[in-house]
Amino acid sequence: DTEVTQTPKHLVMGMTNKKSLKCEQHMGHRAMYWYKQKAKKPPELMFVYSYEKLSINESVPSRFSPECPNSSLLNLHLHALQPEDSALYLCASSRTGINYGYTFGSGTRLTVV
Amino acid sequence: KQEVTQIPAALSVPEGENLVLNCSFTDSAIYNLQWFRQDPGKGLTSLLLIQSSQREQTSGRLNASLDKSSGRSTLYIAASQPGDSATYLCAVRYNAGNMLTFGGGTRLMVKP
């Protein structure tokens, strides 16, 4: 298995809703990442998990809450989002050494109404 | 500040042309550089990964080169096809912090 699987592919949520994005990989990668991408912009790093521990939080608002319950699974819990949070959310994984590249998922297209 | 720049931002070519996409980075102390392809509304597909000790990598019609001293990488696409139309992103791993720095991308259109 050489893929990062993200679900759902599309999500529409109201500003008072609570939802979660899910990311799964079975490549044995111990580093996992959440990125946010706005239209026609490059991905922006949100969070990094290394060995299931949060190692980097790029000053992301608390309405985004990441969770890494095990080495294969990464969640992003969403609560009280704003319309400007609408974006493509990308999950990625990699081996933890510096010589390895990243594998990205296909993303979740989030629309906040 | 460690930055990555891609020029041009957009490129339109007729089918069959050989083309070069450019990526420049501000600090030569990199670990590796990765080229990605992104179709509209989709995720990133890794095309080539070049380690700092390497000069080039090839995969099919794609060839990526790396010149650390000048802070440049190029992605060469031979005999372009309409199916190559996509956004191409260059990403540099500058340090051991497990972080990629992305360029702004080049949107490529190959016309039949």
Image (cartoon, rainbow, N blue to C red):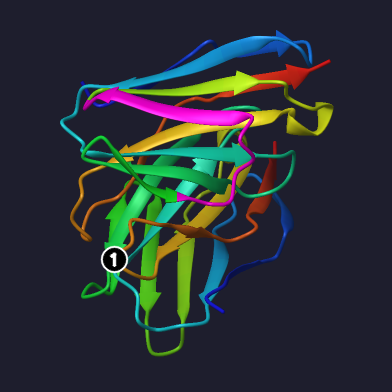
> In the depicted view, which residue is nearer to us: B77 or A30?
A30
> In the depicted view, which residue is nearer to us: A69 or A37?
A69
The residue wearing badge 1 is B96
Considering every residue shown, the one lying at the far bottom of the view is: B69
Residue B7 placement (x, y as % from top left): 66, 68
Vertical comparison of B55 with A94: above or below:
below
> In the depicted view, which residue is nearer to us: A42 or A46?
A46
Residue A105 placement (x, y as % from top left): 43, 28
Asked if one can make out residue B85 in the rendered structure from this viewpoint, the answer is: no
How many marks the image carries: the answer is: 1
Vertical comparison of A70 with B105: above or below:
above
Q: Residue at x 73, y 24 (%)?
A: A81
Residue B30 placement (x, y as % from top left): 34, 74
Q: Residues within 10 Å of mark 1 (few under 14, many from 20)?
A: few
Rendered-image quadrant of the N terminus of chain A: top left
Residue A62 placement (x, y as % from top left): 61, 35
Query: Which three-letter amino acid code belongs to the residue tagged 1?
Result: Ala
Rendered-image quadrant of the C terminus of chain A: top right
Q: Residue at x 21, y 40 (%)?
A: A51
* Region of the chain picked out in magenta, as a range: A57-71
> In the depicted view, which residue is nearer to us: A41 or B10?
A41
Asked if one can make out residue B57 in the rendered structure from this viewpoint, the answer is: yes
Q: Is residue A63 magenta?
A: yes
Q: Residue at x 65, y 27 (%)?
A: B41
Q: Chain of mark 1?
A: B
A80 sits left or right of A104 in the view:
right
Q: Residue at x 40, y 57 (%)?
A: B99
Q: Quadrant of residue B35?
A: bottom left
Secondary element under disc 1, as helix, strand or loop, is loop
